[in-house]
Amino acid sequence: MKAVLWTEYGAPELLKLGEVRKPEPTDDELLIRVHAATVTPGDCEIRRFDLHVLFWLPLRIYFGLRRPKRPILGMEVAGEVEEVGKNVKRFKKGDKIISDTGLKFGAYAEYICLNTKYAMALKPVNVTYEEAASLPTAGLNALHYIRLANLKPGEKILIKGAAGCFGTYAVQLAKLQGAEVIGVDSTGKLSILNELGADHVIDYTKEDFTKSEGKYDVIFDVVGNSSISEAMRSLKSNGRYILATPWVIRVLQGKWNSMFSKKKFTFSLAKYRAEDLVYLKELIESGKLKPVIDKKYPMEKMVEAHKYVEEGSKVGNVAITVQGHNLFQ
């Protein structure tokens, strides 16, 4: 089968299209014919191994000290079940499904075998494979952090990095909670935030939201690239700051500031659960949630896709068409 091979740590150009043996499912696995995958910032970080110091050594041992020993990236997949292990009861041959791949990765290939312990659900019937592929990581993370916010109707939530893969889902999920949503991103990305339901937008290249003291009930910081101490000043006295990126200095800043006020700082990694993916699927099918796809690339142009994601100009998600199949049904 064809796959995009990752045999060295470093630049996008090191990704090469090649041939590998088609996998065979165990009794607890599904063989999935992959129709679409995504390129996430996480895929790019793993590819070049630009990771947080706390995770660097254990993940380097896992992936390979000198070079990758799991040579196929891709953490989100949408496809069709081709074979079913004898112990699998939840799915059958022909089912159209979406799934995360965990640390196994492997979505950049024509086929993948996955244990049903991963967050896995039937694909929403009213979107393409490319659109559906963005749910298992981007959608689940956005849902996790918006639930952490414990929003009440009418509360103000500021989402920093609102036009990214997490953010575009988070804006919509916060609106479903009845919140007043303020989306923060760069100039060219603001229009999509209005389309998704944001009540207000802030262009961070022209306005610093941290100068508004005591204004927001919740700040959801997707990017974590600035001072947490300054940002927390813009929270109300009992506000909540939620960080999605585990950089040590940011976490320490947040914890330190929360010690001397009623403001709460929270960071936790998302748990990927099938029932949450089913919930997101149902929201999409009911028209209450929609994926945002900036660009679609064929698998043969994976290098270009990775470069585009690393530029930082994407809006929402970047999808990879693996099998040339984008039908709803």
Image (spheres, rainbow, N blue to C red):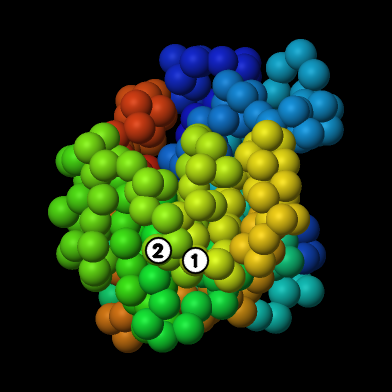
Residue 226 visible? The answer is yes
Total of numbered circles in the picture?
2
As shown in the figure, which amino acid type bears the numbered disc 2?
Answer: Lys
Of residues 299 and 308, the one drawn nearer to the viewer in this rendering: 308
Of the numbered discs 2 and 1, the one sitting upstream in the chain is 2
Of residues 327 and 151, the one drawn nearer to the viewer in this rendering: 151
Q: Which mark is residue 215?
A: 2
Picture quadrant where residue 103 is located = top right
Q: How far apart are marks 2 and 1 (CA)?
A: 6 Å
Asked whether, in this view, residue 229 is left or right of residue 286, the answer is right
As shown in the figure, which amino acid type bears the numbered disc 1?
Answer: Lys
Is 234 drawn above or below residue 199 in the view shown? Answer: above
Q: Position of residue 328 (x, y in %)?
A: 28, 69
Q: Residue 236 carries which label?
A: 1
Estimate how packed mark 2 is, as few (under 14), some (14 to 19) or many (20 or more) residues with alpha carbons within 10 Å.
Answer: some
Residue drawn at 61 percent across, 31 percent down: 46
Residue drawn at 58 percent across, 52 percent down: 243
